[in-house]
Image (cartoon, rainbow, N blue to C red):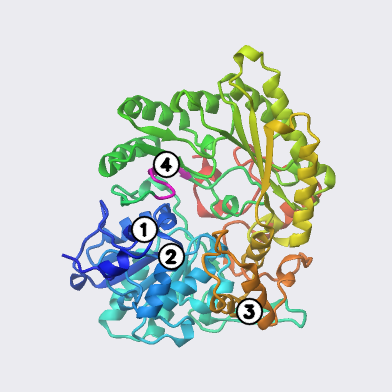
Amino acid sequence: MRKLALSDEILLSIQQPARYIGGEVNMCVKDPKEVAIRFAMCFPDVYEIGMSHLGIQILYDMFNRREDVYCERVYSPWSDLDQVMREKMIPLFALESQEPVKNFDFLGITLQYEMCYTNVLQILDLSQIPLYARERSEEDPIVIGGGPCAYNPEPLADFFDLFYIGEGETVYDRLLDAYKEHKKKGKSRREFLEIAAKIPGIYVPQFYTVTYREDGTILDFKPNHPNAKPTITKELMVSMDDYRYIEKPIVPFIKVTQDRVVLEIQRGCIRGCRFCQAGNVYRPLRERSLEYLKDYAYKLLKSTGHEEISLSSLSSSDYTQLEGLVKFLIESFQGKGINISLPSLRIDAFSLEVMSKIQDVKKSSLTFAPEAGSQRLRDVINKGLTEEVILKGATDAFYGGWNRVKLYFMLGLPTETVEDMEGIALLSEKIAEAYYEIPKDQRQGKVQIVASSSFFVPKPFTPFQWARMCTKEEFLERAYIVKDKFRQMKNAKSLKYNWHEADLSVLEGVLARGDRKLSLVIEAAYRNGALFDSWSESFDNEKWMKAFEDCKIDPDFYTVRERSLEEVFPWDFIDAGVSKEFLTREWKQALGETVTPNCRQTCSGCGARVFGGGVCYENKN
């Protein structure tokens, strides 16, 4: 029987002790002494968030299929346990074996969101691993980062030994095999990093040198080691069916954010929204076959006992076999107490028909994401959604029995005017009016329209990576303009408007487009007590502002400063599949308010064809 790392006394004194004990259904159990490589897989947030992350479940399953590897999990201890561990000098431990992370060969950290960066340092600190890669000894684990934020790894570059750029299913086996051979021969840490640097998709930050201009922009970014590649090309699964999916996901004891089976139906997106990083870095769109998904739907539900299955993708409506898959799921599972969840649907007639079949008689809210209040601005961002389509979708939904609608917008988008801002209220009002145009005897009570706006953050590898970002004050001014317009609407009692935290969005913008100089700020903010910044109750902007001041770094340099098309970006050494030429062209198209057709309508020459598969090669021999 495993000995728990935490005593009963500690477990009884903290919130949700089940976060730290492991032992869940489908947890992998191996003898640590019988494997060649021990890998601690970390999500730098609380257990409930990390356990909902599909990527970690996929890698956990993939690694543990190897007899020579034992992959275990670790999450950020919540603030109450964090304090106890520091006071009692308890090293951070993995859930499966309950053994200290510092004893492992690898610590892999998923970088899902910029506001978790101080939690990365918490993980290292509590694990008793030196924060900076250059300070680690032969006894310390190799620290490797991956995930969406690894597409600009530079703000965290000094803290990581390696980064894996792209999808984890492709070359991790090669990396682990290289480490196994390295360990057998008793070679040094640096010698392993030299071997790893040759592997596709692997970036070793210490093997590159950055030089700066007097104005603070990058002059040059070059390898300083012969094994380091000048360009790191992302790793990508070309054929989705060639890779085994999870069969037995871990089932947590406590309720987590995504408490259901997740069936990934495709990767990538055809839409080309100019603000969306995922839509660019996961190109090209690649689908799993219908038969593949049918097989795994059965296996997942059988192995977990979950009562809900969710179809995961960036845009479920664009999956070509969606009708057949939904029909199969309804016929196979609906009468057996299994709910079907379809996020990321475009609201059209087919989607509404599907949702009518899979939702209870008491209909839940429908979600639309117009993103912008005016057609002009929707064309700027290449949303591909007209007001006519939005209103028709809402009207069809109202006739179908729905009376609650959630609308998602962004404020601070490039070229935004007061007219665009006020358009958010006007569009919400038009949707409410569409409801009240339905005969009274066919309505389901009063309509509820909830409009929410986040603040626009320019991200790497999007056409808006050159865009200026608003200040906190500008964001709030825009939110108040929208709020005032809502008050003027005839159906104001049926409308509600709220917005995201402005200072948090600004900080996200700094970290999203930052360079290596920010490692000092991240460390200083962490030392100031910044932790769980993605949680509004924990976020303290003053701790970050003090860090910027103490490090003599101006956050405005990374946000409000105008960028030229010639500027060298910190992430330019990464080939994410979309060329800088394409992104430049799309930036100019945006400023010209010109729409680019989606990938199934015509090829826009983004560069993703070089991968040799997916939507780029549909219907081609």
Q: Amino acid at mark 2?
A: Trp
Residue highlighted by disc 3: 517
Secondary structure beneath dot 3 equals: loop
Relative height, residue 251 to residue 149 (above, below): above
Relative height, residue 325 to residue 581 (above, below): above
Q: Nearer the viewer, mark 4 or mark 2?
A: 2
Q: Judge the density around disc 4: few (<14), some (14-19), many (≥20) Cα neighbours within 10 Å.
A: some
Q: Nearer the viewer, mark 3 or mark 2?
A: 2
Q: CA gap, disc 3 to disc 2?
A: 28 Å
Residue 594's image quarter?
A: top right
Residue 39's image quarter?
A: bottom left
The picture places residue 57, in percent across and down from the top left corner, at 36, 54
Task: Determine whether, in the image, residue 156 is placed left or right of residue 104.
Answer: right
Query: Are the residues flagged by discs 2 and 1 in contact, CB closer than 8 Å?
Result: yes
The part of the chain drawn in magenta is 256-266
Task: Depth check: give the residue in front, 242 or 109.
Answer: 109
Residue drawn 36% across the image and 78% down it: 141
Residue drawn 26% across the image and 44% down it: 303
Q: Judge the density around disc 1: few (<14), some (14-19), many (≥20) Cα neighbours within 10 Å.
A: few
Q: CA gap, disc 4 to disc 3?
A: 41 Å
Residue highlighted by disc 1: 16
Q: Amino acid at mark 3?
A: Lys
